[in-house]
Amino acid sequence: MDKLRITGGPRLKGRVKISGAKNSALPAMAASLLTAGEVTLENVPLVNDIFTTRRLLRELGVMVEFEPDHSARLRAEKILSHEAPYDGCAIGARPINLHIQGLEKLGATVRTEHGYVEATAERLTGSEIVLDKITVTGTENLMMAASLAHGQTILQNAAREPEVVDLAEMLNRMGAKIDGAGTPTIKIEGVHELKGTMHRVIPDRIEAGTFLVAGAITNGDIEVLDSNPNHLTSLIEKLREAGVNIETGPEGMAVRGNGALKATDVVTKEYPAFATDMQAQYMALMTQANGISFITENIFENRFMHASELLRMGANIRIDGSRAIVSGKDRLTGANVIASDLRASASLILAALIADGVTVIDRVYHLDRGYEKIEEKLRSIGAQIERLK
Ligand code: EPU
């Protein structure tokens, strides 16, 4: 299993280019199943979650070809199988009750048998669906299903994430009639058929956010190119409150540390509030702030696993239910640590960048699910980081 070895110290300086959003590219790839026409995607990040989905789609009979320039061509001319094999999906366990309820509302029959969810329908029929809880992939899934249903669907309490908007734009270009994506109410007028299209995936806001924190924590000076600051307003506001200098422009963002970080509280919530996917990275930053910060996680349970690893590096963090209390500012020291999930891995890298000495991060396969060439990108702006095979 690969590990990362990081020697803390250098201030990061220079320019990095942000890849396409994995969480936009994943549903965009799935959307290729809705048409026999060819779908071309641009700006697809070359990360393991994407390769897993490519494998899955190929099993179903979709022709998928990736080009080195980050474009992908997909064609679901003939679907050969309707089974997503258990061993073909490493994206992790997540409840899907709301996806199932929504599909049932559209007229599907859904059963769970022998560990597989089996959904069947002739043609779905539009309906009004009120989601009990805001769900990103649930919203995306139902938007796709309703696009080819008979009649109108209204999705209430829909997720407003930029990835939902990106998918709606792509589906509309395929011939769907979706209105209101980006707001809590999405109206979908079902159509008979969707056609192929070309779509450029939006920049990865979480990767961009991670580099903003890298600039802030190392007191560095980084230009985060090919990113969209409009998707990161909560984070940018928080970082500014903490004393970090951030400039935004049409090409992306620039981050500059001012040497003194102020503790600021964050509460994770659905978009446009502070993203759960930035919580772990923000916690690493707050270990270096002056004062005490409260970090409240509202989206996922059990998403503080990075805290115990940060403690081993010398941080002062106490967990109280869904709240973490971080007392800064402690000197961190390099240690052997274990990454527990994708964003936790990023948090440990950030801590390692400013820790005294060497940190070795184990289980970086989590990181490889979602960050494209992160070591190369970090090295190019001055980090001392290498992969141990
Ligand atoms: N939920 C249910 N029932 C459902 C669906 C969701 O109870 O049927 C709950 C979840 O357990 C969670 C909350 O609703 O507590 C929100 O989950 P959501 O469905 O919004 O999450 P997701 O769509 O599975 C996406 C991202 C995650 C990101 C979350 C929250 C993708 C592929 N994944 O997950 O990204 O954390 O939204 O913003 O888009 C990551 O990239 O590392 C990652 C975990």
Image (cartoon, helix red, strand yellow):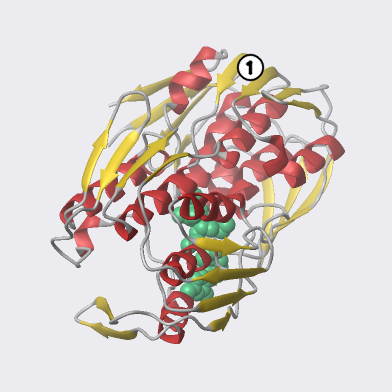
Which residue sits at x=62%, y=31%? 227
Q: Quadrant of residue 300?
A: bottom right
Residue 136 at x, y percent in the picture: 54, 62
Q: Is residue 67 left or right of residue 298?
A: left
Q: Is residue 293 left or right of residue 179?
A: right
174 lies above or below 82: above
Which residue sits at x=62%, y=46%? 278
Closest to the observer: 14 or 81?
A: 81
Q: Which residue is mark 1?
A: 12
Quarter of the picture holding the N terminus? top left
Q: Is residue 2 left or right of residue 298?
A: left
Give the residue type at disc 1: Leu
329 lies above or below 325: above
Q: Is residue 285 left or right of residue 178?
A: right
Which residue sits at x=76%, y=43%? 233
Q: Quadrant of residue 194?
A: bottom left
Q: Is residue 3 visible?
A: yes
Closest to the observer: 10 or 358?
A: 10
Residue 313 at x, y percent in the picture: 58, 37
Q: Secondary structure at mark 1?
A: loop
Neighbor class of circle 1 (other Cα within 10 Å; few <14, some 14-19, many 20+) is: many
Residue 190 at x, y percent in the picture: 46, 71
Furthest residue toward left: 80
Quarter of the picture holding the C terminus? top left
Residue 104 at x, y percent in the picture: 41, 85
Which residue sits at x=45%, y=23%? 375
